[in-house]
Image (spheres, grey):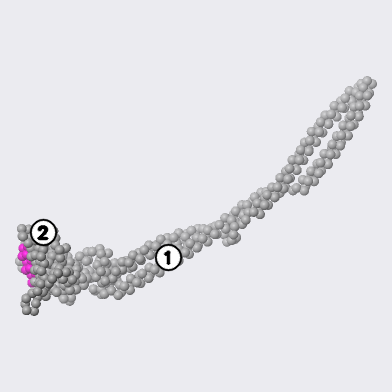
Amino acid sequence: MKILRLDVENIKKIKAVHIEPKGSTVILGGRNEQGKSSTLDAIMMALAGGRSIPTMPVREGAESGRIEIDLGDVIVTKTIRPDRKFSLSVEMKMADGGTAKISSAQAWLDAKIGELSFDPLEFLKKSPKDQADTLRALVGIDTTAIDADRAEAYQDRTAVNRDVAALTAQVAAAPYWPDAPAALVSTQAVNEELAQARKSNEARRQIIREMERVQRNHEQSDNRLRELTETALSRISAAEAEIVRLQAVVVAAKNEAQALTAKRRQEGITYEKDICELERRLGMAPEVPEDPIIAKFQEVEQINNRVRDNAARAHLIQDLAASKAQSEALTAEIQRLDREKAELIASAKFPVPGLGFSDAGLVTYQGIPLEQASGAQKIRVGMAVALAMNPKLKIVLVRDASLLDSDNMAIVAEMAEAAGAQVWLERVGAGDAGAVIIEDGEVVQ
């Protein structure tokens, strides 16, 4: 279906407009604020339902506005009041020249018009994401779940790869001792050896203390006896001086001196015997150096530190292997999702050859992002998408068509003609051949 006739009265800036399109391209020309946009808005208001009616739909001062569109098989008539309330009539043309009203008129229109409001230039103005969403909805594929799963897998793999890099650095920096034993060395034997050495050394020190005690006692006794002997000899000298008077004293003193000398000699024998015995025992209790044994503790601890270093490094290597395996699994999952998405996209029927989606889910044309395509390529894509979204009512409304140069205008006309469609374009000025010029809400040329 196409528009064969359009009559608009008192809608927005329009007073009265009557247009009977010729050909596949309808150009609405004229200065700004004269009614070109209002004409396209009137088509929308008539066909798209209450959602398309603006806040002030009726020309100022008018009691109501009216739109009538002849679509060939049916005539659509809508009357709109300033409060946005409206009446809608859709009449089917009969073979006898009469008409028959279609019940549920708006539902019937909704089933026919599709995305009538779709503008190829608006599609090109959309963000890359919105373009991709529009195209996915058009071709009937939804990669949202795949894209979400892939994004999650990619994010997980990024985190795992950070762990792989960190663990690789830790393994590289971790000390490794190839000559270290596999297990920790026990310090029990060293402890026992040190305890035995300390016990032996303590016994030796006790013997030395005993020797010192005996020697002290001997020295004290010898000094005491020496003093006594000296005293006796002194008395002898005194007695000899008084030999007559002290003969008896001399004899007694000599006897006492002899007895003391004998005792001293006996005590010397005892001392020598004790000293010999203690020296014998001292020889049987050799001194054991403790420092070498204590050094063994340091050696054992050094070995055990190396064992711990090797065990920590082995654990890091295990963690690294697990992280690498997880990263590889996530990579495989991403590749699987990419294949699934590629197969889904490959099965889709695009409105123009060369359209597709990038790995990031954005629209591409001939393998490059649509935003990097040439102006002519973008116009072809926008028109193809617009036509595909209106398969039954092949009407495309292009606002801001002044942005199109002559080459792009030719592309639009060519594609509309090839698709059997009708394109209504709003352009500023009166220089386009065959344009419908609107001035002050009326057609003047």
Q: Which residue is rendered at x = 48% and y = 58% of the image?
A: 170
Q: Residues within 10 Å of mark 2 (few under 14, many from 20)?
A: few
**Count of numbered circles on the image:** 2
**Amino acid of disc 2:** Asp
Q: What x and y, as percent, mark residue 48?
A: 15, 66
Taking the image as shown, residue 156 lies to the left or right of residue 306, namely left
* Rendered view: 140 above or below 208: below
Taking the image as shown, residue 256 lies to the left or right of residue 220, namely right
Residue 379 seen in the current view: no
Indicate which disc, 2 or 1, sits on the residue closer to the N terminus: 2
Q: Residues within 10 Å of mark 1 (few under 14, many from 20)?
A: many
Q: Which residue is rendered at x = 7% and y = 62% of the image?
A: 64
Q: Which residue is rendered at x = 63% and y = 54% of the image?
A: 187
What residue does disc 1 label?
Answer: 327
- Res 439 quadrant in image: bottom left
- Res 266 quadrant in image: top right
* Magenta segment: 6-20
Q: Residue furthest front?
A: 103
What residue does disc 2 label?
Answer: 83
Badge number at residue 141 = none
From the viewer's side, name the closer residue of 103 and 373. Answer: 103
